[in-house]
Image (spheres, rainbow, N blue to C red):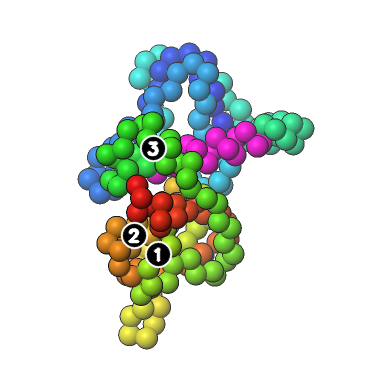
Amino acid sequence: GTSFFVVASGRLAVTKRDDATGGTIRLAHLGSGDFFGEMALLSGATRAATVTAEEEAEVLEFRAEVLLDIAGRHPHVAQSLRRFYRQRLLANAMAVSPIFRPFQRGERKLIMERFRAREVAEGETVIREGEPSDGLYVVLEGAVDVVKAKDGQHVTIGQLREGDLFGEMSCLRKAPASASVVARRGGTLLRLPRETFDEL
């Protein structure tokens, strides 16, 4: 992503590919005054969703360097964008996850408020294979590897990035984690503590 967009008029749909079914999941509708494209700018990752005009629309495009210049001169703009980015990332993760689909939008918002930020350094083990997970995690910034012990070796069986969840299976089954999760790139994770997960 190299631009950030504000909807001037019209109606647009935000969708994401559902890897489980091969279909698409509708994440949101956007109208006049809404904005999009900030997630890829703030995370540095590739676009996580597709935005399609549902009718004739007009959007205002702000290049990344313009937004960075504004944020540099007005720090509250950067803080607001980061706060909104966190909320949107969590909302998108919940919309895609089968665990949170039964909850209504208002209930999801209350759940989002219970997540806590956790900073991780490169190489740090977040969840250890054979031990229970201490909660459900969403990658806010950075990247993690899913690693499994096999024949005395540690084999990477998956890679997760911004917006991906992990740790939910150990919480759901109340069982030890079936794989370790290690930070490939330092960053920030959002954690829903295990006791809160159990309560929900």
- Is residue 139 shown left or right of residue 174? right
Above-or-below relation of 42 to 192? above
Q: Residue 92 appears at what percent x and percent y?
A: 40, 39
The magenta region covers 78-93
Three-letter residue code for mark 1? Ser
Q: Residue at x 56, y 31 (%)?
A: 4
Above-or-below relation of 42 to 5? below
Secondary structure category for the residue under label 1: loop
Kindly report the distance in space between the C-alpha atoms of the residues bearing marks 1 and 2: 6 Å
The answer to whether one can see residue 139 in this image is no
Q: Earlier in the sequence, mark 1 or mark 2?
A: 1
Kindly report the distance in space between the C-alpha atoms of the residues bearing marks 2 and 3: 18 Å
Q: Earlier in the sequence, mark 1 or mark 3?
A: 3
Q: Residue 9 appears at what percent x and percent y?
A: 48, 13
**What residue is pinned by disc 2?**
171
Q: Main secondary structure of the magenta part?
A: helix
Q: Residue furthest bottom?
A: 152
- Is residue 70 shown left or right of residue 53? right
- Residue 8 in the magenta stretch? The answer is no
**What residue is pinned by disc 3?**
108
